[in-house]
Image: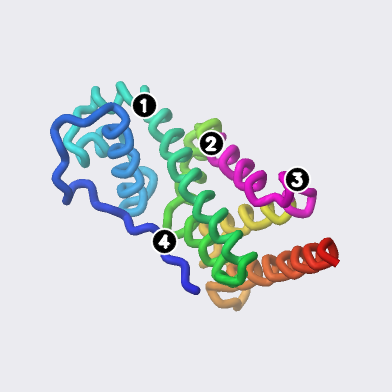
Amino acid sequence: MAIENTKVVNIKDAAMPRRLSPEASRSAALEAARELLLEAGPQAVTLKAVAGRIGRTHANLLHHFGSASGLQRDLAAYMGNSICTKIGEAVFQMRGGEVTPDELADLIFDHFDREGAGALASWMLLSGNEDALDPIVEAIHNLVDQIAEDGMADASLHELTLEMVLMALGDALLGGPLSASLGLPREAGRQIAGRKLAASFDEWQARSQSAND
C-alpha cells in the first residue's frame, strides 16, 4: 500500500478572505510558511514573505508570532505534529498488515527530506534558535507514547525512534553526496531503515504471539 504525502495547498492561488479569525489567520500563515520552505528553502521563510503570501501586513504577523523566531518555532510545532500524526497512523497500519516496513521508512524519510523538516531543523540550529526544535522533540515523544503497547514504551522503542529520526535527518542533509561517495544507491539509507523497522516489527509480532499463547 503506497502512502501519499499531504498535498501542499498554494495559499496565494486560493481566494483568501480579507477578514479571518485569529486562529484561521494563524493557520493560513503557517501553511504559507510551509509552502515557502518547500519552494525556496528555510531562508525564504520570513515574516515579510509569509505576510505577502497571504495578503496580510508585517504587523499582523508580528501580532501572531512575536518575531521571526516565534514563526520558526510555531512552524516547527505545526510540521512536527502533522508528521508525527501521519507516522503514528502508519505504524498502526503496519501492525495491521496494511503498510510495509519499507513504506513506513519512506514516509519518515520523505517528511525529513521532501517535506522540509530536515532543512528547517538545520536552519534553526545554524541560526542559534535551538529552542525552536522543542516542539518537534515533544511531538516525537508524544508519538512514542501513542504507539507504545499498554501505555508503556520500553527502551527498545525509544532506541528505534532515536535511530529512525537521526537516520532520516542525516539522510535529508547528507544522504545524496555521502551515499554517492560510498558507491551506494541514493535510497540506501531508506533501505537500511526499512530493514531495521522490519526486524523490530518481527520482534513485536513474536512478543504479541507469546502474550496470546
Q: Residue at x 35, y 53 (%)?
A: 38
Residue 28 against residue 105 in the figure, above or below = above
Percent of width and height locating residue 153: 74, 47
Q: Amino acid at mark 3?
A: Met
User: Which is closer to the viewer, label 3 or label 1?
Assistant: 3
Q: Amino acid at mark 1?
A: Phe
C-alpha span from label 3 to label 1: 36 Å
Q: Write down the region rendered in magenta.
A: 134-158
In front of the other: 207 or 61:
207
User: Which is closer to the viewer, label 4 or label 3?
Assistant: 3
Q: Amino acid at mark 4?
A: Asn
Percent of width and height locating residue 24: 28, 34
Residue occupied by mark 1: 65
Of labels 4 and 3, earlier in sequence is: 4
In front of the other: 50 or 176:
50
Residue 87 against residue 70 in the figure, above or below = below
Assess disc 3: are there few (<14), some (14-19) or many (≥20) residues with their C-alpha within 10 Å of its C-alpha.
few
Of labels 2 and 3, earlier in sequence is: 2
Residue occupied by mark 3: 152
Of labels 3 and 1, earlier in sequence is: 1
Numbered circle sitting on residue 20: none
C-alpha span from label 2 to label 1: 15 Å
Q: In the figure, is residue 132 to the left or right of 47?
A: right
Residue occupied by mark 2: 135
Query: Which picture quadrant has residue 212?
Result: bottom right
Assess disc 1: are there few (<14), some (14-19) or many (≥20) residues with their C-alpha within 10 Å of its C-alpha.
some
Q: In the figure, is residue 168 to the left or right of 22?
A: right
Q: Main secondary structure of the magenta part?
A: helix
Q: Secondary structure at mark 3?
A: loop
C-alpha span from label 4 to label 3: 29 Å
